[in-house]
Image (cartoon, rainbow, N blue to C red):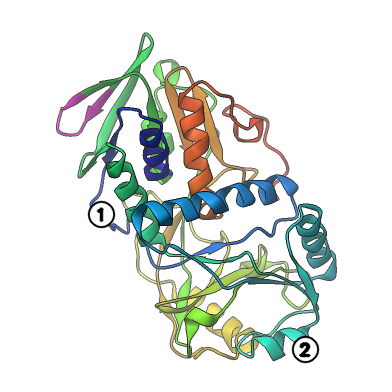
Amino acid sequence: MGSAAAWRLASRGGEVTLLERFGPGHDRGSSHGTSRIFRLAYTDPFYVDLAVRSLPLWRRLEEETGRQVLSLTGSVDHGPAAITDALYEALTASGRPAERLVPEQVAERWPGLRADTGAVFHPEAGRLHADEAVAAFQQAARAHGADVRHGVRVTGLSVLGDGVRVVTEANEEWRADAVVVAVGGWTAALLAGGASAPVSGVPKLRVTQEQPAHFPAADPLSWPSFIHHPGAGLPATGRTTDGVYGLGSTDGVKAGFHGIGPVVDPDHRDRTPDLATVRALAAYAERWLPGVDHTGPEPLTCLYTTTADHDFLVDRQGPVTVLGGCSGHAFKFASVIGELAASLVHGEPGPSRFALGRRPRTAR
């Protein structure tokens, strides 16, 4: 989100400096690796619209940088008919193509994937290459004149009149007319400070270590992305309470349980694979993903920073704009969230849905 905001702000002619705590391509947060799902399929029209708005911005990023970051292979959502029907209705009401399928049709079209009860396919979906996307945002930001600096840890932030004072771990001091804070799992720590905090209304954020895995498969790049919704053949309890997601990548077919990991401190987390979760993913793959080698999972870890309602934080107070609360589903929206951030910095209103201090909705 921070790199996307730097791109969109610099493209508007602003004098932009991007301070990155870690080096290029780091794996300390939520934006590394080779694969993130891109999809338009939400039952909520708000998110369908937001994803639709992100698509041309991803293509603009590719045009500006010459990097391919988004591959559209389509997406299969499957599970209870009530959910797949609602997804179909939301997509078609927004004028997007979608197709209802039965499990036999899914198996015929994608033999490596076994569907549950009902299914909906939409072609405007696929995968984003996370590392390439972040690198492309920064490349595009530089091309528009931004100064991108890595290895700079911000330790303090304060509002001074109409501007902002930023202090780094190396005791450097920066002054700016406006600042965008996009620090993922470190959001609460950086913005803490009681009455002296630079913004108010930052909600409680749950930072967890999640553990998907890559499974070997023939031609994984041909796979559609997929989401298995619980409530039919998949239990809506335990690890599968919020379903299973997956997609093909250069590292194999990725699959993971959504938002089940332990709460962690992002500076002191144990990246040791949880063997029980690995075994549970392998058992899922054996039943539902006949096209992968379920005996060879390669686990990996990443961070989720989740709000109570799973909506993001995209808001401005005074000279400080906050981007965060990705809740495990924000990467697909990064291009448009960068645009929203640039608009906020320039004084335009943002979505009330993402406001600081909002009353949380019931979690989706």
Which residue is painted at 27% across and 32% down in the image?
A: 155
Q: For numbered disc 2, what is the local secondary structure?
A: helix
Q: Is residue 106 above or below residue 208?
A: below
Give the magenta-colored segment's residue range: 166-173
Residue 142 location, x and y as percent?
A: 27, 43
Q: Which mark is first along the chain, 2 or 1?
A: 1
Q: Which residue is mark 2?
A: 104
Can residue 123 be found in the magenta stretch? Answer: no
Which residue is painted at 72% across and 84% down in the image?
A: 106
Residue 111 location, x and y as percent?
A: 64, 91
Q: Which residue is mark 1?
A: 24
Which residue is painted at 14% across and 33% down in the image?
A: 170
Cα–Cα span, label 1 and label 2: 44 Å
Identified by mark 1, the residue type is Pro
Q: Quadrant of residue 351?
A: top right
Residue 205 location, x and y as percent?
A: 52, 41
Residue 306 location, x and y as percent?
A: 54, 47
Q: Nearer the viewer, residue 176 or 230?
A: 176
Identified by mark 2, the residue type is Glu
